[in-house]
Amino acid sequence: SRSWRRGSSRSPPRRRYDDHGHYDRPGMDHMQLSSDDVAFVLGRGGSTKHKIARVAQARLELHDDGRLDIAGDERARQHAKEYVSLVLAQRLGPVYIDFKSGREDLSVVDVPHDCVGYVTGRAGQVLRSLEEEWATLMFFAKDKDAEVRGSGPIERLAIFGRPRGRMGAHLKVMSAVEHKSPGFYLDADRRVKGDVLRRYADDSGFGVDCMEIQAGEMSYALGKQGSTRKKLARAAGCVLEYVGPLAFFGGTRGERQRGREYLEWLLEQRRGPVHVDVARRDDVNVIDVPSQVVGYVTGTKGASLRQIEHETGTFIFADGDRSDNTPEQRILVFGCHEEARRRAERIVRERAHRKLEEDKFMGRAGPPPNYGGGGYGGPPRRRSPSPRGRYRRSRSRSPR
């Protein structure tokens, strides 16, 4: 019938397959790789393929016959194909890139020749860790348009990826090189050489700021194995790296402002109590804790708060001086994520409540319900003989 014919015309179209029997759908590109190229693009445990897909924001599928399917929007597919070609070029020798092309996904960092091994690490482990941390693709390359192609005092490190990731990796490399070769990125007045502060700025407010840290405060701002720096960066939601005596903050205006304030408050704590006006802030939870349990909540030298910070990605400290003789003291929980602050607040309140209950039970004549004694009072127990007495009796029975 007529209606049946109209209904049958709406059946889904047949899938299109190429000459090799692979499904070919819109929004997908393909590359044919040799057997040697397959192993190189795949990497150990698929790490290289995963890295390329992550940086390009595309989906990659590698088939047994060497066909690589690349899915995503047009920009992601184009980047993925370029990254695969760049990775394969490393098998044949130096990689040549047109650094003047103005690519929006590329940052270039000058590295002194004697620091290349330090930045790369054994078997490239340092670069691989930076790629994993910042979702970037990094390798040393030569300028395609250079008049003289040879080794010089400066090598050029190419960083591919999104702006935030490139910025974080860039600042990390600067930190390592300035530590190894002081004065390469900073002049005698501790000012930044080059345009790193302007390179990542855009009209939306994204960019980089910096502030100077006094020599005696750097180790405190850094923390053990960089733990304090990582804590502040995570809580503020910004990129935070130390290059020589300078602290660099990367991200949006709000993220950079939070990072700077958190670092300033941290350093102020070395000199005395810190008071913060939280009236108009949207990045803080305020907890009123009874003064008699504040020490238990914070822990010895703040160890308990440091653990909570590590678990929740927040920045926590007591507001004001503990010697104010007030019945309660404020604990401030800072962070860019509301759920993280709420989780930290719950942990702090639970610790304070537990300590108050313990102190209350210790002051009673009997044990609290369900505690079953254990040092919380109750009838006196029969005193067992001392070890010394038992030892003497056993000695008196022994043969002479």
Image: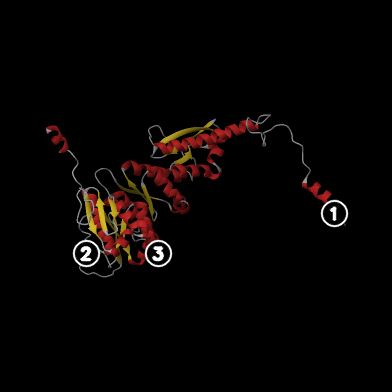
Q: Residue at x 56, y 39 (%)?
A: 296
* Foreground tag (1 vs 3): 1
Quarter of the image containing the N terminus? top left
Q: Residue at x 20, y 52 (%)?
A: 17
Q: On screen, 245 above or below 361?
A: below
Residue 56: image location, x then y, percent: 27, 52
SS under mark 2: loop
Q: Callout 1: 10 Å neighbours few (<14), some, many (20+)?
A: few
Q: Mark 3 is on which residue type? A: Arg
Task: Tell me whether the residue at label 1 lies in contact with that at label 2, contact meaning CB atoms closer than 8 angstroms.
Answer: no
Q: Mark 1 is on which residue type? A: Ser
Q: Which mark is residue 398?
A: 1
Q: Nearer the viewer, residue 136 or 282?
A: 136
Q: Which residue is mark 2?
A: 144
Q: Mark 2 is on which residue type? A: Lys
**Residue at the left extreme, as displayed:** 2
Q: Which mark is residue 122?
A: 3
Residue 259: image location, x then y, percent: 38, 44
Q: On screen, 378 above or below 80?
A: above
Say left or right for 106 vs 309. left
